[in-house]
Image (tube, grey):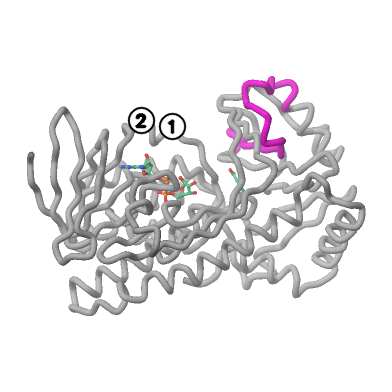
Amino acid sequence: MTITRTQVAIIGGGPSGLLLSQLLHRQGIDTVVLERQSRDYVLGRIRAGVLEQGFVQLMREAGCATRMEAEGEQHHGFMIAHQGRMDRVDLQGSANGASVMVYGQTEVTRDLYDARDEMGGEVVHLAENVRLHELTSQHPYVTYEKDGGTHRVDCDFVVGADGFHGVSRKSIPSDVLCEYEKIYPFGWLGVLSNTPPAASELIYARHERGFALCSLRSQVLSRYYIQVPLTDRAEDWSDEAFWSELKKRLPQQVADGLETGPSIEKSIAPLRSFVAEPMRYGNLFLAGDAAHIVPPTGAKGLNSAASDIHYLYQGFLAHYQKGDSAGLENYSQKALARVWKAERFSWWMTNLLHRFPEMSKTDLRLQCADLDYLFSSEAAQASLAENYVGLPY
Ligand code: APR
Ligand code: PHB
């Protein structure tokens, strides 16, 4: 068995783990990232593409924002199509000039990997059977298997950034951990296509046939979603069937102008709200999808991971540079306070725009009333806008 040492062992080489590793390394704090997949596998994942300003700022602080600022698009609003009309949510006007950055999460992850390479950051891929040990002692350690051998990493702290299916959350005793979950009775069928976007801004569509979303990655790469039953499989949807159904759910003028093309990626994602409390156990800290999941409607997945990383980064900085551990002590409480607001917003926006099975005619009228109130009230639009651009850290 090889034995090495680091200050912060990070499980998971997705956006959360990489961003924290990069931020800490730039402050001279030693980390190692243990990722069970290959880099190509991680970079092959297609995820969301709307970044809050807080995330953009963290990427700047990490020295990873150059390509994002060159290729990303600042968006100052988005459209909601409903009841035969299209209304614009003016983020800039309703949220004190705020905006969001439209830039693919796959590109974020690529930029983070490139930055780790540039700094000689240690990211171990194909790290199998990761196990966390002695988490409540002053000498926690992590073991993993690779190349036929077992390896041990002694550390001060472990950060579980290993996503919903990772090992970290499961390393917290069941009598300590409390999990909250809501499963939605539908999924999102997503398609990526090398076609120009349907419009200059995102279009969220509420339709009697089901929800649809027109998004983008660039002016030549578009991302579309339609709500589908949980029983559907991506392979059951031809490109033609997808485009036809999407157009039925969009306003006529948008559908008429939609440029279709072959799908270069097609997948169905289930929707769930999930939170695990606490986000700390001994010297283990959970971050990102390891601790919480949101339905993608409000684009809060990566953005709620970002605030976890911000709080952890500040907590480790104070601990190592000033001997002040208050930030680490109140990490879980502080992170959860913002996570739950992101959960609320994502749940609200999902209920506002989706067609739930078994909705009564009363439920449908109440949904329309919610939309009518939203677009007749500046206060309601300001509330939506401040949540969409991101609540303060
Ligand atoms: N050992 C090592 N690595 C693991 C293990 C394990 N047991 N289990 C999972 N991982 C890795 C996964 O392969 C993945 O690369 O942890 C990483 C977790 O990354 P994400 O699931 O992307 O989660 P996170 O980094 O928190 O990102 C949060 O980005 O990926 C999106 O939907 C996600 O929007 C959310 C945001
Ligand atoms: C995306 O571009 O993938 C996207 C955008 C906004 C959302 C969800 C997904 O709310």
Q: Above or below — where is 191 with respect to 78?
A: above
Q: Is residue 92 left or right of residue 107?
A: right
Crowding near the residue tagged with mark 2, few <14, some 14–19, many ≥20 C-alpha atoms within 10 Å:
few
Q: Is residue 370 left or right of residue 302?
A: right
Q: What range of the chain is rendered magenta? A: 219-242
Contact, mark 2 vs mark 1 (Cβ under 8 Å): yes
At x 79%, y 48%, the residue is 206
- Amino acid at the residue labelled 2: Asp
- Amino acid at the residue labelled 1: Gly
Q: Is mark 2 within 8 Å of ligand 1?
A: no
Regarding mark 2 in the picture, which secondary structure is present there? helix
Q: Position of residue 104 (x, y in %)?
A: 50, 43
The mark found on residue 22 in the picture is none
What separation in Å lies between label 2 and label 1 (alpha carbons)? 6 Å
Residue 233 belongs to magenta span: yes
Residue assigned mark 2: 40
Picture quadrant of residue 258: top right
Residue 41 vs residue 121, the one in the foreground: 41
Residue assigned mark 1: 44
Taking the image in four quarters, ligand 1 sits in the one at top left
Residue 241 belongs to magenta span: yes
Crowding near the residue tagged with mark 1, few <14, some 14–19, many ≥20 C-alpha atoms within 10 Å:
few
Q: Is residue 338 visible?
A: yes
Residue 42 vs residue 79, the one in the foreground: 42
Q: Position of residue 322 (x, y in %)?
A: 19, 78
Judged from this view, the residue extending furthest toward the front is 175
At x 70%, y 71%, the residue is 382
Q: Position of residue 2 (x, y in %)?
A: 7, 41
Q: Above or below — where is 179 with respect to 330?
A: above
Picture quadrant of residue 174: bottom left
Regarding mark 1 in the picture, which secondary structure is present there? loop
At x 17%, y 62%, the residue is 156
